[in-house]
């Protein structure tokens, strides 16, 4: 579609109230592409390059499936779900990453993602109580890294340095994403992600276009289509593996099943594919806040997801949440702004 | 000063880069008032009402000092610093709150602030290891609450319900803040803070004006002036008590001593008084992010604080910080925006 003039500031999409006032405001941009490849919602600047961070792990995992590595190493659906995860480092996540590495003849020492403490208090405290430091296997990206390593092994690539932007595996991922977004992904728009792999910036509209293809298979070859469907099915069957206890992605997909694939990324990015409706969604909160990205994604799912009954109720809960004091009393709320509601109406 | 037309969006004040791109942007407003009571910097909308949250704990503690309660109960300087703190719930903080309560003939059960886990992993894990739930005394506001209770006891006020906006203690605090900000503080602009006490909204410019008086004593009676100086001296002598290990307020005041009083509040609010220079500062990040409020405050202190040598170097470190991946490699930075640098030049 032809783009209207780019506004100087993205619109307020999520607001947090306290008493009678709006206390805080999050601005952001949202792109939704439909099954024909048309941009049906473009709120804010959707042509500026955006680092997708972890929101596109599904695409980063395609070589693992498409190369035949997942079959050769006998990865389970739970492990495939983990290969596209930003997990909490809970015991089940860590055990499954260890299993993936073992199946590919690899070990924790091969991971190049840097150490990270588990997300939950109980898991952090269990480590501290054993006097152990956080390790690479606890990194929220360790499932993705285990999958990248398995793909590199199967493809006969050098495993050391698999995180470098010029490594053949990362170049293969770049080419896949360039094709699916319809964007040149160039090194002057390449950052290094928190787990040390490259993150290639593309317009939000391009990421939404890619996720519309994830939803529908449109313009994709049979192998890619099959690989994407396999990942979507694996995640729908194991939503715990893609995030963890209490996490937004897990809660949404526990509620929606295969009707929505949603994936969070750092700095306020979120992507989704809605297979039943044929929509691809990409959004970015200007200031990087996860609370706003989640609220915005929940509002989009309510508006576009075709959800009903319990699934709809579960997602509505995430789209409008009370702010409470530490005594548990409601003192305000986090909700979609009027401008966002109008755009989604 | 006459106000220019209010812009529709506050300017970007802090930006986070990754690779060659700006990845995230924080907008906000900043007011600086000088020793004559003039607004010398007004960036963004400084006339809209802002909940000051914990950034004005110094003013909430004035009845404790002015009533004579602190003297009667023999509070130490460390305990007075704690009465204006948002502390980490570290063992020293918890012990000092218990001491304050004991001196006033009160107990943990009198606190009405709601329970909260300590901020640091080691303290959270120590609680969990003992099988104990978080308690009210661990609440980051428990020092303030102990001070409010001590003041209420000394003034012969009902202690139950001391957090309610119509309690005489809260009305006394409201009157003090109305006077110092030059603003009517009304119940239609009164929210409930996370610790259940009222938070009264006033323009950012009003909060900056109040903190200019905190810096200079201008327009204040002798008792108030003495009370403020006593609190400022107590905090300068015990910066650990006002926040805790690794915290921004503690790090800044360890470096600057009495040259800067800085206090953070939730949802991206920060206030400061610079006694040597006679400035009062109030700022609010639109989206509520602490990382941006801290970066903005550090930039303001570098520009206005008259800091030199080690103190300046320590604050400069906080005004421009590397973003690293989990391997510790620099991948970007968090820094003042060009628009902010121009406003502070």
Image (spheres, coloured by chain):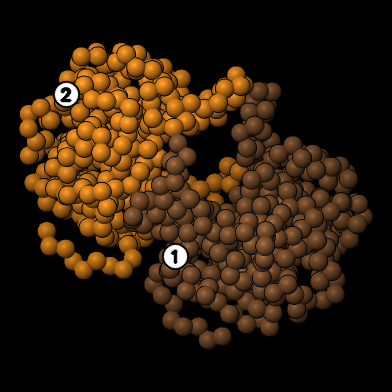
Chain colours: A orange, B brown
Q: How many marks?
A: 2
A266 vs B150, left or right, is left
Q: Are marks 2 and 1 in contact (CB under 8 Å)?
A: no
Which residue corresponds to mark 2? A67
Q: Residues within 10 Å of mark 2 (few under 14, many from 20)?
A: some
Helix, strand or loop under label 2: loop
Between A41 and B280, the residue placed more toward the observer is: B280
Between A219 and A16, the residue placed more toward the observer is: A219
Q: Would residue A295 be seen by someone viewing this image from the given angle?
A: no
Between A138 and A294, the residue placed more toward the observer is: A138
What residue is at 77 percent from the left and 75 percent from the top? Answer: B217
Q: Quadrant of the N terminus of chain B?
A: bottom right
Between A121 and A182, the residue placed more toward the observer is: A182
The image shows residue B40 at horizontal and vertical percentages of 58, 80
Query: Pointer 1 indicates a residue of which chain?
Result: B
Which residue corresponds to mark 1? B337
B224 vs A289, left or right, is right
Check chain identity for marks 2 and 1: say if they share one. Answer: no
| CA–CA distance in space, label 2 to label 1 | 45 Å
What residue is at 46 percent from the left and 83 percent from the top? Answer: B4
Which residue sits furthest bottom? B2
Helix, strand or loop under label 1: loop
B192 vs A217, left or right, is right
The image shows residue A109 at horizontal and vertical percentages of 41, 22
The image shows residue B65 at horizontal and vertical percentages of 83, 61
Query: Pointer 2 indicates a residue of which chain?
Result: A
The image shows residue A258 at horizontal and vertical percentages of 23, 29
């Amino acid at each position: 579609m032809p783009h209207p003039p780019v506004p100087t500031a993205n619109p307020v999409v999520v607001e947090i109230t306290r008493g009678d006032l709006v206390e805080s405001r999050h601005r952001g941009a949202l792109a939704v592409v439909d099954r024909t490849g048309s941009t049906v919602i473009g709120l804010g600047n959707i042509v500026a390059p955006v680092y997708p961070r972890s929101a596109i792990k599904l695409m980063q995992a395609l070589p693992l499936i498409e190369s035949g590595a997942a079959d050769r190493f006998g990865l389970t659906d739970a492990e495939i779900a983990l290969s596209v995860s930003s997990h909490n480092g809970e015991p089940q996540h860590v055990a499954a990453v260890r299993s993936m590495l073992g199946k590919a003849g690899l070990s924790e020492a091969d991971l190049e993602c840097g150490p990270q403490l588990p997300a939950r208090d109980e898991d952090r405290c269990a480590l501290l109580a054993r006097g152990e430091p956080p390790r690479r296997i606890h990194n929220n990206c360790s499932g993705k890294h285990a999958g990248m390593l398995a793909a590199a092994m199967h493809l006969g690539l050098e495993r050391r340095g698999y995180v470098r932007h010029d490594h053949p595996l990362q170049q293969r991922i770049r080419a896949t994403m360039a094709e699916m977004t319809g964007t040149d992904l160039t090194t002057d728009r390449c950052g290094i992600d928190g787990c040390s792999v490259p993150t290639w910036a593309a317009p939000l509209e391009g990421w939404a276009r890619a996720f519309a293809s994830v939803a529908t298979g449109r313009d994709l070859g049979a192998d890619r289509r099959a690989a994407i469907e396999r990942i979507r099915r694996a995640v729908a069957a194991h939503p715990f593996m893609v995030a963890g206890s209490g996490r937004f992605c897990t809660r949404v997909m526990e509620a929606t099943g295969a009707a929505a694939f949603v994936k969070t990324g750092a700095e306020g990015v979120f992507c989704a594919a809605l297979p039943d409706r044929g929509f691809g969604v990409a959004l970015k909160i200007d200031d990087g806040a996860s609370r706003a990205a989640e609220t915005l994604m929940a509002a989009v799912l309510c508006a576009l997801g075709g959800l009903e009954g319990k699934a709809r109720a579960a997602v509505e809960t995430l789209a409008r949440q009370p702010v409470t004091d530490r005594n548990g009393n409601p003192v305000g709320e986090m909700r979609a702004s009027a401008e966002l509601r109008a755009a989604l109406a």
